[in-house]
Structure formats: structure tokens, C-alpha cells
């Protein structure tokens, strides 16, 4: 998709405030409301805008601990990976799961929990019990310096 300067401005603004009114958005990018709405509609129709989400305050929800868990699988087969993925995405604590390369591990999970005790329960009774999990390595987030940062456009 070819994007001009105004398209990119619109996308940057929508990534930080998807609830902005079309009128305010149009004013901020120096367009009249109708062409601005047309551009946003085109982004949606062509699949560039996939939807909108609401970012919640983790601390206010009592989710004070974020862990990044690197997971190694026993076998590198399609079936084992598929089974792991089906199960791990069902855990509400898992807010991100990526297949990665350049490391010894196969997956990198982003997990949000209420406490170290919650993390221990998640790790020992659920994650480690999934078929095919061979090894895990966890790093804990000290501070997120880019909360809600959008993609570069």
C-alpha cells in the first residue's frame, strides 16, 4: 500500500488515540472531515487497520509482574509446535507468544501475573506441564519504557 505524508500522520495519531473524532483528526492533519474519513475507511477496507483496542492499566488491575519466558521444545515438529501454540494461547496470563530465531529457545512468551507466587503457579502447574516443553528461561521486566507505542509509520 502506498502511503503519503498525510496517511502516515493519520496512522500515527490513530495509534496513540483510536477514539479521536474524525473532526479532530481532520483538523490535526489539515484535511476536511470527508477526505479524512475516506482515508481511514480505505485503511480499514484494505486491512491496514485491523481493529482498535483499549490499553488497560496493568497496575490498577493488580498485574504487577511481567515476565518474558523463552521456551525450548523437545522436538521440532509441526505437530508439537501446533499443539503447544493451541494450548499456550488459552492461558489468560500469556499476552504475547512469538516463534523466534537466533536463540536456543523456540518461543518467547510475554506473561503478565499478579505476583511471584502467581508466576510460580503458572510456570510449574501449567506451562511446564504442556507436552513438548523441554526448558524455560525467564527474564522479568523492571520497567516498560514504551507503553502503548505504535508501529513506525
Image: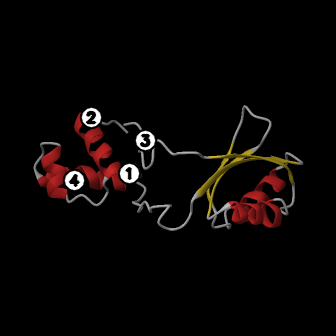
| Labels 3 & 2 near each other (Cβ < 8 A) | no
Q: Residue furthest left?
A: 32
- To which residue does mark 4 refer? 38
Residue at screen point 85% across, 63% down: 129
Mark 1 neighbour density, 10 Å: few (under 14) some (14–19) many (20 or more): few
Q: What secondary structure is found at the residue carrying circle 3?
A: loop
- To which residue does mark 2 refer? 4
Color style of the picture:
secondary structure
Q: Earlier in the sequence, mark 2 or mark 4?
A: 2
Q: CA distance from mark 1 to mark 4?
A: 12 Å
- Residue 64, image x, y percentages: 57, 59
- Residue 105, image x, y percentages: 78, 41
Residue at screen point 16% across, 45% down: 28
Q: CA distance from mark 3 to mark 4?
A: 22 Å
Q: How many marks?
A: 4
* Residue 46 numbered tag: 1
Residue at screen point 25% across, 34% down: 5
Q: Earlier in the sequence, mark 1 or mark 4?
A: 4
Q: CA distance from mark 1 to mark 2?
A: 16 Å
Amino acid at each position: 500500500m502506498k502511503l503519503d505524508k498525510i496517511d502516515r500522520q493519520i496512522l500515527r495519531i490513530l495509534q496513540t488515540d483510536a477514539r479521536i473524532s474524525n473532526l479532530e483528526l481532520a483538523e490535526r492533519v489539515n484535511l476536511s472531515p470527508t477526505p479524512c474519513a475516506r482515508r481511514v475507511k480505505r485503511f480499514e477496507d484494505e486491512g491496514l487497520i485491523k481493529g482498535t483496542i483499549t490499553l488497560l492499566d496493568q497496575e490498577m488491575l493488580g498485574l504487577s509482574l511481567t515476565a518474558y519466558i523463552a521456551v525450548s521444545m523437545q522436538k521440532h515438529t509441526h505437530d508439537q509446535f501446533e499443539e503447544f501454540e493451541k494450548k499456550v494461547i488459552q492461558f489468560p496470563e500469556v499476552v504475547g507468544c512469538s516463534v523466534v530465531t537466533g536463540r536456543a529457545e523456540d518461543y518467547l512468551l510475554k506473561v503478565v501475573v499478579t505476583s511471584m507466587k502467581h508466576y510460580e503457579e503458572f510456570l510449574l502447574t501449567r506451562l511446564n506441564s504442556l507436552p513438548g516443553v523441554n526448558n524455560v528461561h525467564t527474564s522479568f521486566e523492571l520497567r516498560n519504557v514504551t507503553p502503548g507505542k505504535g508501529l513506525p509509520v
